[in-house]
Amino acid sequence: MSPTCHGPDGLDCSREEAWVLHAAVLDHVERLVAADRSPDRAMAVLDRVEAGERLDATDRELVRNALAAYLDDAPERDRGAVREMLATLSTRQASSSQ
């Protein structure tokens, strides 16, 4: 039985990872707002994450940055999922640039 993808198309996420991804991108939006920067792009990515839509290369870059920043403040229970998704995103980036 193959795992069900709960995240955006192209990033196979468990239900737990999808929640962590959502939390990381939402945290990114909140950091932008707190810094008086526009959250529009991040909100669009958050909408795509929530809808399970495909992420393009710039979306994945924003997600990577959001996950990396979230890792520092993430609850211990989320850190493994963050590391897994960062590794998956790094692998996808390396394979698509070859």
Image (spheres, rainbow, N blue to C red):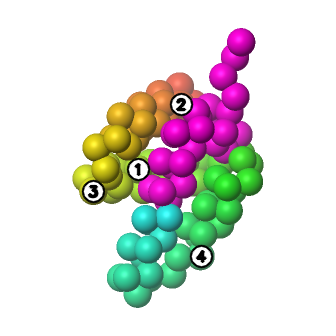
The image position of residue 48, as x and y in percent, is: 69, 56
Image point 44% across, 74% down: which residue?
A: 30
Say what amino acid the circle numbered 1 marks: Leu
Stretch of the chain drawn in magenta: 1-25
Say what amino acid the circle numbered 3 marks: Asp
Local SS, label 1: helix
Mark 2 and mark 1 lie on one chain; the one further toward the N terminus is 1
The image position of residue 50, as x and y in percent, is: 67, 55
**In which quadrant will I find the N terminus?**
top right
Marks 3/2 in contact by CB < 8 Å: the verdict is no
Residue 43 or residue 26, whichever sits in front: 26
Q: Which mark is residue 92?
A: 2
Left or right position of 21 against 12: left
Mark 1 and mark 4 lie on one chain; the one further toward the N terminus is 4
Mark 4 and mark 2 lie on one chain; the one further toward the N terminus is 4
Image point 66% across, 44% down: which residue?
A: 8
Is residue 47 visible in the rendered image? The answer is yes
Local SS, label 3: helix
Say what amino acid the circle numbered 2 marks: Arg
* Residue 66 magenta: no
Distance Cα–Cα, label 1 vs label 4: 18 Å
Residue at which label 1 appears: 67
Q: Which mark is residue 40?
A: 4
Q: Residues within 10 Å of mark 4 (few under 14, many from 20)?
A: few
Say what amino acid the circle numbered 4 marks: Asp
Mark 3 and mark 2 lie on one chain; the one further toward the N terminus is 3
Image point 60% across, 69% down: which residue?
A: 43
